[in-house]
Image (spheres, rainbow, N blue to C red):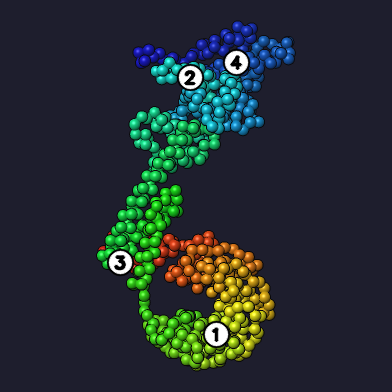
Amino acid sequence: MTSCRVDIRPLSDRELREVICQPAAQVGLKVSTELQERIINEVKAAPGSLPLLEYALTELWQAWHREYQEDKTIAPELTIEHYRAVGGVEGALEKQANQVYQQFSGDAKKQGLVERIFVELVQPGVDTEDTRKRVWKRELVSDIHPEVLVDQVLAVLVQSRLVVRDAAKVGTEEQVETVIDLAHEALIRHWSKLQNWLEKHRQYLPVIRQLRREARRYAAEQGNKSKHFLRGVKLEEAQDCLIKYGNLGYFDAQTQEFISLSKKTWIEEETEKEKQILEALYMTAEFQWSQGNRQGSLISITKAGARVQQLRDSRPEVKPVNCQKVVEKLQETLYDRIQDSSLLTTLTGHSGWVNAIAYSPDGATLASASDDKTVKLWNVQDGSLLTTLTGHSGWVNAIAYSPDGATLASASSDTTVKLWNAQNSSLLATLTGHRSLVNAIAYSPDGATLASASSDTTVKLWNAQNSSLLTTLPDHGDGVNAIAYSPDGAILASAISYKAVKLWNAQDGSLLATLTDHGGSVNAIAYSPDGTTLASASDDSTVKLWNAQDGSLLATLTGHGGSVNAIAYSPDGATLASASDDKTVKLWDVKLKFDLNLDSAMAYAHDWLRGYLTHNPNVSASDKKLLEI
């Protein structure tokens, strides 16, 4: 080819003048001297503009001819006014291209195809100018742009002399196909709309074309086809491209299928890889545990838990089958860890079951109530017994500190409630009036009222200052197991054995609502810190969340395998803890309403490992990274 190359020098002024004037003279037209000089100067200033000149001269003749059709007396001369009307050498082509594009203004799909055709006909330069690029017509056909639509749009573009259509052989075969090309490479440099399209698509156009080539290589492969699949960053880039351009017609069916199969294969490979990693960590944790290395076992299984969290949050499509096994092992390890090393002290001294405990508001004292008919007060710092409160003649079921910490109330099966001075342990008063065992007590938030709930089917409200009975709420129809004040003190909730929760006006004792959806005795109730939600726990193995304002059921939390006996909200109200006969405590995200098995277990694991990983000089750097997760 180099031996046949011919260098074409720029045309001289005389040659340019001939190019301008001779074609006009053949149809009986003159070209004004002013116009000749203007065109020559513009062409000389813009190398490569000869195709534009050809187009501009044609437009000049058409402009004059339109005038002549209206007025046969006009002079047979092309003037500077005609030149300005067509936009000059550079403007003529852009004007024509814009007019053609506007023909499709009523059809967004056709306009989108016009944009795509011209973008496809350009090869973006890398540190060089953009150049024209021929494409097979079949490459323009896609699900978005079917062949019939492509043919319709191409017909207009060819007729307008913006693109050309030709036939060419496919490779070395005899098969002939239609090929499309720009009619004027000058369109790339002088049509601003095309330049804007190219800038918009410049980042992804090379990626799209590379994906097409890789899809064709995959389709042509006769051997190991999977080696062509996209993985990692390339797959992410392809998917990103598909999201942005899938609805614009740039991806044919073959390329879309290639990306889809790549993703499917990648998920299968990643799932198997993660399965093996989790299995290795799990087996390591099992071995370490069997060798008595509890700390090492917790680290290994926490690493596995961290991988499961990462998969869930960043790659949810990758789901190894052993994820649940890891979560269960993590919980089991944590439970054993609690038994092994989280125990600070054991308080011994009661001679019967311990039914209730309560911290003083300042956290310095822990009170415990027992079937041995006593209440014991313990020093929280050293676990020493401070004093034993005696006086009840039956087992003590419940205890509660007043909000100011000055008084401790205790409720007993002897049908009484006793008030004790929390400082000197002296008995302040005995509240009588219930006819059966007292199951629960609760102070109002302002400390002015003490409520007591009994198996005699009543709730009594007492003046906490002088111990007088204020009122008895109407008969509940069954034993009352639990009571709770709303945070603002306006409502008192009571839980009864007959599968219901009742809401009462705490000021006048009127019944506001009865919540009935449980299938068993309601054992415990608790308000969220913001007072918007009431939680109830039942023998039916569920926890229910209620709208505290209108009593409507918000959600039913299922997962326990036995009666749920106690519930408590975290101070921020985001988490609800529930304790059950199934020997588990579950933590729930009460906004999303699901069991926080993994996240809560990981949080506890990090808490327990923090000190060990921070201060142990023998811990590896990779293990210390667990603290960053």
Q: Earlier in the sequence, mark 2 or mark 3?
A: 2
Residue at (29, 64) in percent of width and height: 289
Helix, strand or loop at mark 1? loop
Q: Earlier in the sequence, mark 2 or mark 4?
A: 4
- Check disc 1 and give the amino acid type: Leu
Is residue 112 at all visible to an observer of this figure? Answer: yes
Image quarter where the N terminus lies is: top left
Q: Are marks 2 and 4 in contact (CB under 8 Å)?
A: no
- Does residue 328 appear left or right of residue 98 in this picture? left
Instruction: Tell me if mark 4 has few (under 14), some (14-19) or many (20+) residues whose alpha carbon lies within 10 angstroms of its own.
Output: some
Q: Earlier in the sequence, mark 4 or mark 3?
A: 4
Q: Earlier in the sequence, mark 1 or mark 4?
A: 4
Q: Which mark is residue 177?
A: 2
Q: Which mark is residue 294?
A: 3
On the image, numbered disc 1 is attached to which residue? 437
Compute the Cα span from label 2 to label 1. 95 Å
Q: Position of residue 20 (x, y in %)?
A: 57, 13
In this rendering, the label closer to the viewer, 2 or 3: 3
Q: Earlier in the sequence, mark 2 or mark 1?
A: 2
- Check disc 3 and give the amino acid type: Arg
Compute the Cα span from label 2 to label 4. 31 Å
Image quarter where the C terminus lies is: bottom left
- Check disc 4 and give the amino acid type: Thr
Helix, strand or loop at mark 3? helix
